[in-house]
Amino acid sequence: MPDLTWEYEGYDPVEERLRESLCTLGNGYFGSRGVLPECTADDVHYPGTYVAGCYNRLTSEVSGRRVENEDMVNVPNWLPLRFRLAGGKWLTPDTAPVLDHRQVLHLGPGVLERRTRFDLGDGRALAVRQQRLVHMADPHLAALRTEFTAEGFSGELEVAAALDGGVTNDGVPRYRDLDGRHLTHVHAGTAAPDRVWLRCRTRTSDIRIGMASRVTADGAPLTIRHEPPVTRQLARLRLTDGRTATVDKTVALHTSRDPAISDPLYAAVDRVGRAPGFDALLASHRTAWNQLWRRARLDVPGDAGRILRLHLFHVLQTLSPHTADLDVGVPARGLHGEAYRGHVFWDELFVLPFLNLHFPEVARALLRYRHRRLERARTAARDIGRRGALYPWQSGSDGREETQQLHLNPRSGRWLPDHTHLQHHVGSAIAYNVWQYCEASGDAEFLHTKGAEMMLQISRFWGDSASWDNTLGRHRILRVMGPDEYHDAYPGATEPGLDDNAYTNVTAAWVLSRTLELLDTLPEPRRRELVERIGLGDDETARWEEVSRTLHVPFHEGVVSQFEGYGDLAELDWDGYQERYGDIRRLDRILEAEGDTVNRYRASKQADVLMLGYLFSPGELQNLFRRLGLRLDEDTWRRTVDHYLHRTSHGSTLSGLVHGWVLARARRAEAWKFCQEALRGDIADVQGGTTGEGIHLGAMAGTLDLVQRGLTGMETRGGALWLDPVPLPELSSYGFSVRYQGHWGVRLRLESGHMEVTVPSSDLPPIDLRLPGRAVRLEPGGTTTLALSD
């Protein structure tokens, strides 16, 4: 793959947090923000290194209440490398004049490069070039090469490389009332003249962390100073005008959660001692990245393609093949920052469909994270008097509900109750991902074992949650929240929760019907095992059948209602609020600060009802409503789309993505506007400062899936690859590769008026392609060109 780059020119303190997130490097095991190594945590910079699945739980006093929160831990900072002229001040872009500054993220090889020229006065300058990598071949290694060049002088340069165990979780201002001191028992030592180590543990989860550093400094001797919680290696370099001196720093990181080690400190010291030099590390790192790019090949022209490749880069850094060996979920903000405390939400709904068709082993591992926490989900259901499995809205280490009890409105400064744990639809998202993964991969073993176990327990929860309403003559699901987090209660209600959220009810009906279908197709011995194990009787499956056909979906004014009673809410003065506040994406905060509540209005933070058009093709959605005894024709869906299109503030980066997807499938001219918003979500920080706290992984992966499945109409169902392209005029020619049911590198190319499909040679069975009104069987080694209808 060509050495594509993402570049920043000049130094801008206001932009540093954003750049640090977007220049994060990772390998699926750990990630480190793109902070300049000479800078420490302050109002401008925020160093952060996060190990996938490394959490710690603390209790804080907030507004007179004891609040418990579990965070993904900011582990010791391996990056620090400071420098100064002998006897002078340490040089940083914040403390010394900068002549030039440039930061380049090389996407192809996964390398972050920085070049800075410091003005030392009297015609003297110090040029600094750094190359950084978080190794993609060996997930426990990272390396930093720093080259110093004297311009107009000769003299001595002091360099201090450090490992810093004094870090805290302090990267999100609105969390600063919460205790962020997760590390304790920090110790340091020397392993060899060029090697030091640092060890610590988390305060309550007791995860042991070992880190070791090896420094070489152009032959200069090193002085070691242990000043816990920091250990330093110091060197004095003799600079000669015009010549370059090089300092290499190689670091190894292990935790007690790692498999196949006895002690994380021993493993780190051993690993860094055996690691090759920087050039060899860079070569093997490049090879690993080249292999990833081949497997996830994406050829999209123009600026959209450039942004998509950045998105792909960050998805691969967070969820690489190394993730397949870990017990982790999908952190909503990647390994890039501390927003959402590193928790796992439903964002996997937007991530796994992409991984299914490129890295199915990673998708399977992420689903196993959910399966390992199935018993915890069953406990949560029992705690509210239900059967089955209730998965948490926010998950962390062990699968308990991690949703905060309070959240801060930065506009009003008030801490408010948080009711988002009522988003029970996360269970449907997990079931949907199980089904989609198995359809794309052909993994019948997973579907018949762990997948079936999850789907049965999620269905049991929905079957037990539905209550019969004699007046309506239908089943209802009461006191929940949908994806739209603006609405958590009825106006004036003393208790949170809404009734018959359309998205929740329709997806619950889908889960129940799919689970019944799965039971019918399971091998009889396996079916008997499952039925016996969970005590599933014919009366319960009969109830599932009935509920899946009778769940209530409310309508108002000829459109699908977001929930029962939505049509009774007041209309908002959208133009007035836009004029007064400009950016009204977080309308909930604006109204609360005014003493009002968004619960009173027909106003949505993000796509809710329209999520149904994201998950299901038009035909499948119509069939779902038909199964429920309801009619959803094209005109009704069009009116529904229009209704919510004009009443959504897009306070989530996922919202533009869903709207773009739905409008593209409906061949609407407005589609590209929303697709662009989804593409720009993080690079332009459209949510106003949130990207600096961590990328929005679901939105990034969703844009990739938009061109992979959304615009091609690709579905994996019934043992066939279904295609129904709806190319946008702005994106009508592009290509990509997928991995489908064991076929590696199936190539699809969409051009104006036709689609070309190539299947690589293998001994696998042919692929069945389905287009509207046509069926094609393509043998391995073959290529077919399919004409597309207008």
Image: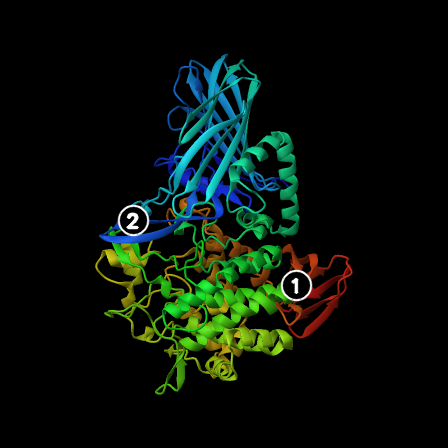
Q: Position of residue 278 (x, y in %)?
A: 60, 30
Look at 25% across and 70% down and name the residue there.
493
Please name the residue that numbered disc 2 is placed on. Answer: 60
Q: Amino acid at mark 1?
A: Gly
Q: CA distance from mark 1 to mark 2?
A: 60 Å
Could you tell me which quadrant the N terminus lies in?
top right
Rendering quarter of residue 520: bottom right
Q: Which mark is residue 523?
A: none
748 and 234: which is toward the camera? 234
Please name the residue that numbered disc 1 is placed on. Answer: 753
So how many labels did they put on this image? 2
Rendering quarter of residue 181: top left
Look at 31% across and 62% down and name the residue there.
574
Q: Amino acid at mark 2?
A: Ser
The image shows residue 312, relative to residue 43, as above or below, that is below
Q: Secondary structure at mark 2?
A: strand
The image shows residue 333, relative to residue 439, as above or below, that is above
